[in-house]
Image (tube, helix red, strand yellow):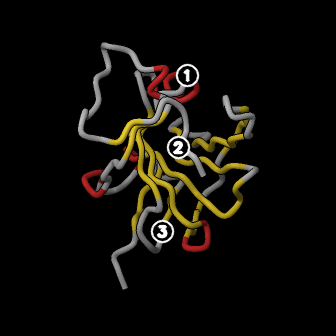
């Protein structure tokens, strides 16, 4: 069995362990991710929900993305760190913030999404596949 992906918030009140490899890893430049990260993009890895265990009680808030889909962002009520996201339209997936990993070097981005919202002051790897919005299907 492969080594699980583990991580959590800065203070340790929220922890996760994920069996399996990411289904998709991306840098997202949508305005919501910019605001949440405090920079020009958010970096995420998405996994099958079936392999995820979470401990601790996260606070959540819902926001509606450009696609009209509702994203639920989860953060630690103690340290405030945003840790993961779920999507009402896709309950079988679980998305973590790359920086919340215990071993962030395991994060390997595959694509840039929402490049239409990119800023010149936040350049990303030009070798990554880039989508103006979200990739199809």
Can you tell which mark lies on residue 50? none
Q: Which residue is mark 3?
A: 18
Taking the view exactly as shown, the residue that stands out farthest to the bottom is 1
What's the CA distance linking mark 1 and mark 3? 28 Å
Front residue of 8 and 99: 99
Residue in the image at 71% along x and 36% along y: 61
Q: Secondary structure at mark 3?
A: strand
Instruction: Provide residue 64's location: percent of width, then percent of height.
Output: 73, 32
The disc, 2 or 3, on the residue closer to the chain's N-terminal end is 3
* First of labels 1, 3 by sequence position: 3
Which image quadrant for residue 128?
A: top left
Residue in the image at 30% along x and 52% along y: 108
Tell me if residue 123 comes above or below residue 136 in the rendering. above
Relative to 113, is 1 on the left or the right? left
Q: Are marks 2 and 1 in contact (CB under 8 Å)?
A: no
Task: Provide residue 74's location: percent of width, then percent of height.
Answer: 62, 44
Mark in the foreground, 2 or 1? 2
Q: Which mark is residue 135?
A: 2
Q: Which residue is mark 1?
A: 31
Residue at 48% in and 67% down: 17
Which of these two is toward me, 79 or 108?
108
The residue sitting at 45% across, 52% down in the picture is 45
Residue 14 position, x and y percent, is 54, 53
Residue count near mark 2 (Cα–Cα under 10 Å), binned few <14, some 14–19, many ≥20:
few
Q: Quadrant of the N terminus?
A: bottom left
Q: Disc 2 to disc 1, how far (Cα)?
A: 17 Å
């Amino acid at each position: 069995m492969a080594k699980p992906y583990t991580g959590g918030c800065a203070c340790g009140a929220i922890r996760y362990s994920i069996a399996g490899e990411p289904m998709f890893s991306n840098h997202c430049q949508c305005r919501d991710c910019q605001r949440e990260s405090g920079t020009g993009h958010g970096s995420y890895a998405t996994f099958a929900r079936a392999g995820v265990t979470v401990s601790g009680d996260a606070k959540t808030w819902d926001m509606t993305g450009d696609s009209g889909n509702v994203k639920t962002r989860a953060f630690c009520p103690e340290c405030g760190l945003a840790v993961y996201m779920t999507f009402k339209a896709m309950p079988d997936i679980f998305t973590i913030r790359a920086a919340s990993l215990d071993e962030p070097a395991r994060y390997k981005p595959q694509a840039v999404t929402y490049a239409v919202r990119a800023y010149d002051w936040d350049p990303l790897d030009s070798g990554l596949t880039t989508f103006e919005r979200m990739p199809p299907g």
